[in-house]
Image (spheres, rainbow, N blue to C red):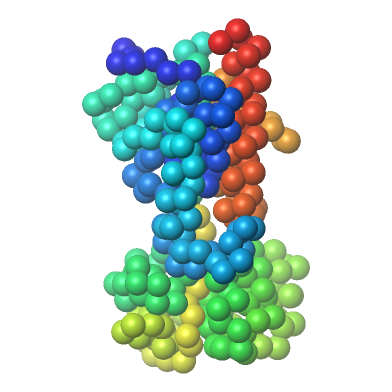
Amino acid sequence: MEANEHVHCLIIGSGPAGYTAAIYAARADLKPVMYMGNQPGGQLMDTTEVDNFPGYPQGIKGPEMMEDLKNQAARFGTDIRNGWATKVDFTGPKHYVEFDNGKHVVSADAVIIATGASAKWLGLESELRLRDIGGGVSACAVCDGFFYRNQDVVIVGAGDTAAEEATYLAKLCKKVYMIVRTDKMRASKAMQHRVMNTPNIEVIWNAVTEEVLGTDGVTGARFIINGTEKREVEATGFFVAIGHKPNTDVFKPWINTDEVGYILNVPGTSKTNIEGVFVAGDAADKMYRQAITAAGTGCMAALDAERYLASKGH
């Protein structure tokens, strides 16, 4: 792969992990270049209110917070660019990354992968429309459950995450309808018992969501049960917990991942199996998936990259 330019530290992705890595890398004089990817700002761009990030006592809108982080990274000299990675060559010692299907190729001494993950959605028109206007559709119960205290909500999913989020919501909400597509859950037995022993969770089995109801905000949902019978419930929140997909396909020929695609880092560090390539944020985190933990790993990746570059005399 022929490079158009060479940079010291390349950051791919622009959520809380990427921007925090950029702030630390820029302050360490690594002259970072960041490519924002095809969703600049990451998953927080889909989030209306962020109330659980320290330092914002009144809360802040997700897009505003990402703009703050972007401006902070730029203030210290991060070169922030549009473009997404379409191919990589991590043979080393220089690492090559192609952007926008070959329009630009960058070689770098150190690479920080901060490409995040994307929530999976059902794909219904009503679901996506209400999600995009901040109308009560969410993929994160821990982030948004607080807004639905003493209200009725729906959660779709049957795995451990769905079961965990259903029980979390049950502590806050009056009633939780849990929508399971088949006649059994994929969740671990312990999580299933927890759901079944929570009196205000009603599991609706063999149910497929047909429509999320509401114009300006969620008012309920309609399901098809056993392929024929229709049922509607009233609810003000609609949570989707059918999994996340890490945005790591482009790195897979080189970087070790688990079966879903989450990058495997050396525990306690941001290091990957390739020397000089580091990972931060949700591309490696299937457990916590919070803005604050992503920011923390962004800091780790920048510090690990700085030490690596110093050890190589860069």
Pick whichever, 3 or 187, lies toward us.
3
Q: Quadrant of the C terminus?
A: top right
Name the image quarter holding residue 145. Answer: bottom right
Name the image quarter holding residue 195. Answer: bottom right
Please provide percent x and percent y for residue 300. 65, 35
Pick whichever, 231 or 31, lies toward us.
31
Q: Residue at x 63, y 14 (%)?
A: 310
Please provide percent x and percent y for residue 224. 40, 84
Please provide percent x and percent y for residue 96. 41, 19
Q: Residue at x 58, y 39 (%)?
A: 298
Rendered position, 22 above or below 222: above
Q: Residue at x 74, y 82 (%)?
A: 197
Question: Residue extending furthest top?
Answer: 313
Q: Residue at x 26, y 30 (%)?
A: 101
Question: Residue extending furthest left?
Answer: 103
Q: Is residue 224 visible?
A: no
Rendered position, 261 above or below 65: above
